[in-house]
Amino acid sequence: MEFSYKLFISVLLLLLPVASFSTHNSSVYQLVCNKNFTNDNKILQINIKNTISSLVAQTFNNNTYAISSYGIGYDTIYGLIQCRGDSSNESCSSCVNNAVHQIRTFCPYSAESRIWYPFCFLRYDNYNFFGQADSSYTRVWPSALTAQNTETFNSALGWVLDAAMGSAVGKDVKIGMTIDYEENSNRTLYGIAQCTRDLDDSGCSYCLEKALEVMSNDCKNHLGCHLISNCCMFRYEIYNLFLEAESPNTGAAVSALLSNGYLN
Ligand SMILES: *[C@@H]1O[C@H](CO)[C@@H](O)[C@H](O)[C@H]1NC(C)=O
Ligand SMILES: *[C@@H]1O[C@H](CO)[C@@H](O)[C@H](O)[C@H]1NC(C)=O
Ligand SMILES: *[C@@H]1O[C@H](CO)[C@@H](O)[C@H](O)[C@H]1NC(C)=O
Ligand SMILES: *[C@@H]1O[C@H](CO)[C@@H](O)[C@H](O)[C@H]1NC(C)=O
Ligand SMILES: *[C@@H]1O[C@H](CO)[C@@H](O)[C@H](O)[C@H]1NC(C)=O
């Protein structure tokens, strides 16, 4: 008995750092490579390289969002890069670095590539997708734990998700971050909704509504969930998932978010 108890505890201890690390580690969430071409298509290779270089230059210049295109006619490549709206220049640059490295390594001959990290998204394609709310590709990761008192949980969660969505739509930065407290379980819920910034308000709203439809099914009663698509991301957790959580002074970070209009 004692042995198995100890084993259980050490398994827990082994698991915990991995679980919390993975949210801040830049491990790949999802990589898609399509429209593969052959090595002898030098024009496409140059256009991809130049589009990516321009995106990277913009993010290194303190932008958390950039679009760019390069080439003429059918060989034109259109690219978009976006970090989560609450990331600093340093965390954005480092995420972009990893994303570019992965996409160059694993999709060298793809005219359509997309990579999602927890804190950034890089996409390029050979058609002009700017401004299109395309939710055809969606992936969802529900957390392992589920709520016991589903009624109070879902009521608090519903408020968080609606508020995050409402707050994202209508802002240039297209990010909404909200918090709600579930009194019964003494739990705080944190939610983030973010659209790609090439979308207008109705595109953003469409993308997040589609995301909510998927989440209401796939995330049902789960204490955390993360959705990605081509046009937006949606995530909620029962811990502070805002990047400012890394700051020692959470109170100041939250008031900074409030004054930025990030939190409603
Ligand atoms: C992230 O996790 C992956 C796989 O677990 C690991 O190979 C990589 O070194 C980690 N990256 C960082 C920056 O720690
Ligand atoms: C394209 O190439 C990548 C990497 O070389 C490969 O992983 C992927 O499956 C290919 N995609 C298609 C649709 O063949
Ligand atoms: C980077 O951007 C942030 C947010 O827009 C701004 O507060 C900061 O002053 C900028 N830093 C530099 C070095 O431009
Ligand atoms: C942003 O971060 C990158 C990488 O850390 C750095 O090279 C660049 O100078 C920074 N840019 C600004 C404007 O601070
Ligand atoms: C609620 O949670 C906080 C932080 O986890 C804890 O300090 C506090 O004691 C809890 N209150 C109750 C009534 O359980």
Image (cartoon, rainbow, N blue to C red):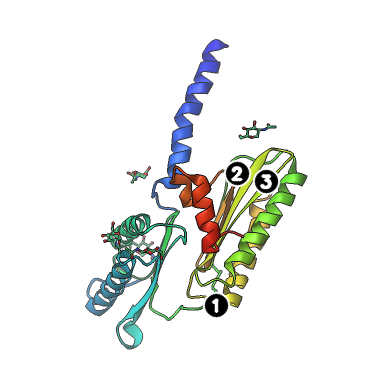
Task: Tell me if mark 2 has few (under 14), some (14-19) or many (20+) residues whose alpha carbon lies within 10 angstroms of its own.
Answer: some
For the N terminus, the image quarter is top right
Q: Amino acid at mark 2?
A: Ile
Mark 3 sits on what residue?
Answer: 181
Mark 2 sits on what residue?
Answer: 238
Q: x%, y% of residue 217? A: 68, 55
Q: x%, y% of residue 129? A: 46, 78
Q: Amino acid at mark 1?
A: Asp
Residue 61 higher or lower than 192, as above or below = below
Task: Tell me if mark 1 has few (under 14), some (14-19) or many (20+) residues whose alpha carbon lies within 10 angstroms of its own.
Answer: some
SS at mark 1? loop
Q: Amino acid at mark 3?
A: Tyr
Mark 1 or 2 closer to N-term?
1
For the C terminus, the image quarter is bottom right
Could you tell me if residue 79 is visible in this image?
no
Q: Residue farthest to the top?
A: 2
Q: x%, y% of residue 30? A: 44, 56
Quadrant of the rendered image holding ligand 4: bottom left
Q: CB atoms at circles 2 and 3 under 8 Å apart? A: no
Q: Quadrant of residue 188?
A: top right
Q: CA distance from mark 2 to mark 3?
A: 10 Å
